[in-house]
Image: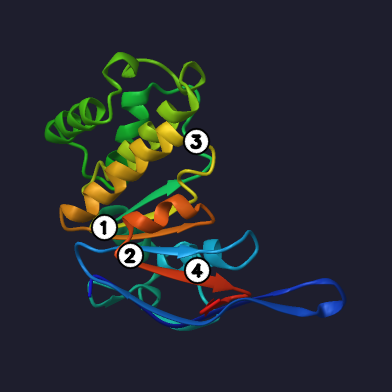
Amino acid sequence: MELKVAGLSKSYKRRKNKEVKAVDGISLEIANGELVSVNGPSGCGKTTLLLMAGGLMSPDSGKVLLGGMDLYALPPEERDRERALRVGFVFQQFYLIPYLTVTENILIPSVGSGTWSLSLRERAMELITRLNLDHRADHKPGELSTGERQRAALARALINKPSVLFADEPTGNLDDDNAEIVLDHIAGYADEGAAVLLVTHDRRVGNRAHRVYRMKEGRFSDN
């Protein structure tokens, strides 16, 4: 399995020291070539699950294995390096840097991971063409439509050819046509051999996934 999470749990303190379990003992495996969707309403814990599985938030308990490597057993700097090389993220809010062009935004992960090269610039151009952003390559995010921003964010996530792609509500801000375009490319990346974990409340995702889990109050639910 390319991605395996075992017994992941995460709790938060609320008012009057009341403890709320955002994620409660979740286990999940995703193989290369699989797109797995975790569906559920806002506040069910799915984003917390994704952040822990992607190495961005330490769990209270449980393990995350990426290609057999225990992410949270690594020193923080080494974990950051492995995440930069092997993991891609797409978020609902895009997180594009406003003063950089589309091309520059797409290349950011390659610079941060120390892998920048001329061939990666060529890959950026390939992704720009594939995602129909040629006419926007030198534009800044404020000049893009919502759908174009999400496609630029997806290209940025794919620049280093990550073995695992994480997507958090990638269609949440999109109309039906743009949602279909983004889902086509995410599903296509799984078909190319990546493991993909997508968390969403968007039921349109279900028919694209190999498996769908329903999440409720921090656990997978049959309802």
Whichever of callouts 3 and 4 sits on the residue coming sooner in the sequence is 4
Q: Which residue is mark 4?
A: 49
The 10 Å Cα crowd at callout 1, few under 14, some 14 to 19, many 20 or more, is: some
> Disc 3 and disc 1: Cα gap in Å?
27 Å
Quadrant in the rendering for residue 133: top left
For the residue labelled by badge 4, is the local secondary structure a helix, a strand or a loop?
helix
Whichever of callouts 2 and 1 sits on the residue coming sooner in the sequence is 2
For the residue labelled by badge 1, is the local secondary structure a helix, a strand or a loop?
helix
Q: Residue at x 48, y 38 (%)?
A: 94
Pick whichever, 171 or 84, lies toward us.
171
For the residue marked with disc 4, what is the amino acid? Leu
Residue pushed farthest left? 119
> Disc 2 and disc 3: Cα gap in Å?
35 Å
Tell me: residue 26, above or below residue 131. Answer: below
Q: Which residue is mark 2?
A: 78
Q: Nearer the viewer, mark 2 or mark 3?
A: 3
Pick whichever, 98 or 196, lies toward us.
196
> Disc 4 and disc 1: Cα gap in Å?
18 Å
Q: Is residue 198 left or right of residue 221?
A: left
Q: Residue at x 53, y 40 (%)?
A: 93
For the residue labelled by badge 2, is the local secondary structure a helix, a strand or a loop?
helix
Q: Which residue is mark 3?
A: 174
Whichever of callouts 3 and 1 sits on the residue coming sooner in the sequence is 1
Tell me: residue 79, above or below residue 64. Answer: above
Whichever of callouts 4 and 1 sits on the residue coming sooner in the sequence is 4
For the residue marked with disc 1, what is the amino acid? Arg
Quadrant in the rendering for residue 74: bottom left
